Image (cartoon, rainbow, N blue to C red):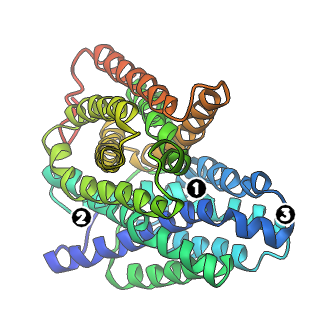
Amino acid sequence: MTVTATRVHGTTAAMGALALGGFGIGTTEFATMGLLPQMAETFQISIPTAGHAISLYALGVVVGAPVIAGLAARLPRKGLLIGLTIALAVGNGLSAIAPSATALMVARFVAGLPHGAYFGIAAVVAAALVPPERRGTAVARLMVGLTVANLVGVPLATAAGQQIGWRTAYLAVAVIAGVTALALSRWLPHMAAPQGAGVGAELRAFRRPQVWFALVTGMVGFGGMFAVYSYISPITTEVAGLPAGAVPWMLAAFGLGMTLGATLGGRFVDRSVTGSVFGSLVAVTGVLALFGLTARVAVAAFGTVLLLGFVAQVLASALQVRLMDASPDAPSLASSSNHSALNIANGAGAWLGGLAIAWGWGYTSTAWVGVGLSLAGLVVAGVSTVVSGGSFRGRVGGVG
């Protein structure tokens, strides 16, 4: 992969353009959760039925990430990313004008299709813009857009959607996606597809056990965070005893933690990818256990939610780079599949946490479900190291 523009300011602008796309994707993904009542009212359906918009978006991510990354393996990276942002604009534009609930569900599926492929391919591009020893930091900076979306974009989109109408939130994301396409066209240097790239070459990545181990680590270990995050609103009001107005602030605390994890955590990944995977999984386990013990204390709940956002973001960045290292000759499909894995973790964590609540164990039981999932992720990561014979060092720059 050849980069034709390598000046520092050019790299900074390119990284900013890539992060802007992440901001739009993060906003459209999470804003829906706060707008379900308004959607349900518009189409005269129940809130659980409106919630299918979230599930279908996630399904779009799971399906779109491997399919797009595989089929588009031979396309130049710059043009592909611009095309993905245009697809994001179309999906959100269709969401904004959906005339029926069915049309909205279809539009949300379409909007989810470019999500995983964008982040996966953008991670490969971001890593190519910097020296090999700084790839962890580059990938983490790419994710700043997603984390700032949780900190700023989602609360603003939710507020605007509640005051003006939910359609405005999706319209705003469509505009952001269009601006991102222009920014990428202006600042992202040309990058050809890797030599020998193609569907067959990308699929061969899945013959490598370490790719599967990394994906399963994300599916299981990251599910622990989602087991709690999915129910953060009732936990805030019914466990911590805070008013409903405190929920956006709790979400903002999580977003702040993610932003810090993206800006600071990349240094850990630069030092050791595998060490960051293990360290962040251990940290997620500890933070979830602490949350389960202290969630009834409002100040402690805010602090642990912030910490959870931090360590979860470090884990996401570490897994992204580990997948790229495990498949250096075909990184796009493996890297994009990370987001499919994380969306599976989203669904699995929320489902298991919901089961614990339904069984009468209370909202804090979600934290202990999360502890179990993160410990299971640690086991998978440990087995992967044993299977590799300790040769997978996780250093940025290659696979041992």
**Residue nearest the observer in this picture, 355 or 61:** 355
Q: Which quadrant is the N terminus positioned in? A: bottom left
**Residue nearest the observer in this picture, 327 or 221:** 221
Q: Nearer the viewer, mark 3 or mark 2?
A: 3
Number of other residues with Cα within 10 Å of mark 2, as a class: few under 14, some 14 to 19, many 20 or more: many
- The residue drawn where x is 58% and y is 39% is 350
Where is mark 3, residue-wise?
A: 102
**Mark 3: amino acid:** Thr
Q: Nearer the viewer, mark 3 or mark 1?
A: 3
Percent across and percent down for residue 215 are: 45, 34
Say whether residue 20 is left or right of residue 397: right
Where is mark 2, residue-wise?
A: 129
Where is mark 1, residue-wise?
A: 68
Distance from the alpha carbon under mark 1 to that under mark 2: 22 Å
Q: At numbered mark 2, what does the secondary structure look like: helix, strand or loop?
A: loop
Q: At numbered mark 1, what does the secondary structure look like: helix, strand or loop?
A: helix
- The residue drawn where x is 51% and y is 77% is 177
- The residue drawn where x is 64% and y is 29% is 355
- Decide which of tag 3 and tag 1 comes sooner along the chain: 1
User: Is residue 233 depicted above or below 355 in this figure?
Assistant: below
Number of other residues with Cα within 10 Å of mark 1, as a class: few under 14, some 14 to 19, many 20 or more: many
**Mark 2: amino acid:** Leu
Distance from the alpha carbon under mark 3 to that under mark 2: 42 Å
Percent across and percent down for residue 154 are: 49, 68
Percent across and percent down for residue 66 are: 56, 47
